[in-house]
Image (cartoon, grey):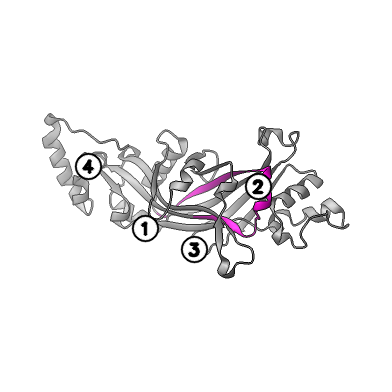
Amino acid sequence: MLVHTRISAPAAELAIKAFVLLASFASPACSFLEAAGEVTIGADQKIPKVSTQLKWPSVDQVLGDALTSATGGAKAPAGLPVSLGSATLAHVQGLMTIDGECHRVVTIPTVESKIKDSVLQNLRFELTNCGDPSRCVERCGGFQGMKMEARIDFQMLDAAKVKKLKEFLSDKTSTDAILQIRAQFFQLEFFETVAGAPDGKTQSIVELFTDSQMGLSSLSGDDDTVVVEQRYLPLISPTTPQRFELDPHAVFTHRLKQAVVDAQDAVWVQIFEKLAIPQKNLYGITLGGGGVNIELQPEFVINALEVVKGVL
């Protein structure tokens, strides 16, 4: 829900003067005269959508040495595919169990993306084996199956977007001028390539999760704030986009506002995805052919009067 600025009658004359002054600092000025002192900066101001595809790393990247260490060079465990590329999460879990692992992390500095101009780097991918109730107790919390978590550095605003946003903010603007930071999602689709299908056909695998969270944090990863929970995923489509506001009280939101106000170049954040796949669904997911497609429109709700304070 938007929080509209209310202008009292005694302050009306001052407010009018403020808007006239603001018009000399921002363009198009007419957009600042709507919503009782608020303006949403997004598609109308030609801040383009963010489109990216985050692919899971291959099994070889995640568990390339697990088969050798688990078997000591002996014959592979029964039921394991000849190629690790076709191994499911159930096979991965079996390898981790044989190897005595409950948790594995892989970092990939360069990330492949099929989306042109997508800026992604430093993928950190985690797998947690929750198959045994006595294993990885602190991480699993009673859940049985596998947990996956991916974190990746993401350029939320490139230099061109920062320049466009700066048309509406002065150098002395306070973070109080940014009332809301929102994302309108047109796509948030977890997919997997259909084995044997032509042209890389994919299918949704959302129904195989019992829990998923998509969120943002600073590059330090110490201020996670969840943006989209699993129950909203079926509602998101190109024809039924859904708008989500960053938690206004979250540490990350305050840091992002400051980063936007201070920015002279690109603004980087970290995207995280947390997924829980129950034991019965592990054979339905492979790593190498899956990932998530993301398409969103960043929106910044600005309090025009606060901007004026910064230029007086």
- The kind of secondary structure element at disc 1 is loop
Of the residues shown, which amino acid type is indicated by label 2?
Asn
The reply to whether callout 3 and callout 2 are in contact (CB within 8 Å) is no
Real-space CA distance between mark 4 and mark 3, rounded to the nearest whole angstrom: 35 Å
Marks 4 and 2, the one that precedes in the sequence:
4
- In-image side of 247 versus 271 (left or right): left
| Nearest the eye: 301 or 183 | 183
Magenta segment includes 287: yes
Residue pointed to by mark 3: 115
Residue 225 vs residue 138: left or right? Answer: left
* Residue type indicated by callout 3: Ile
**Residue at mark 1 to residue at mark 2: CA–CA distance:** 37 Å
Q: Are marks 1 and 2 in contact (CB under 8 Å)?
A: no
Q: Amino acid at mark 1?
A: Pro
Q: Secondary structure at mark 4?
A: helix
- Residue that label 2 marks: 281
Residue 179 at what x, y percent from top left? Answer: 33, 39
Q: Secondary structure at mark 3?
A: loop
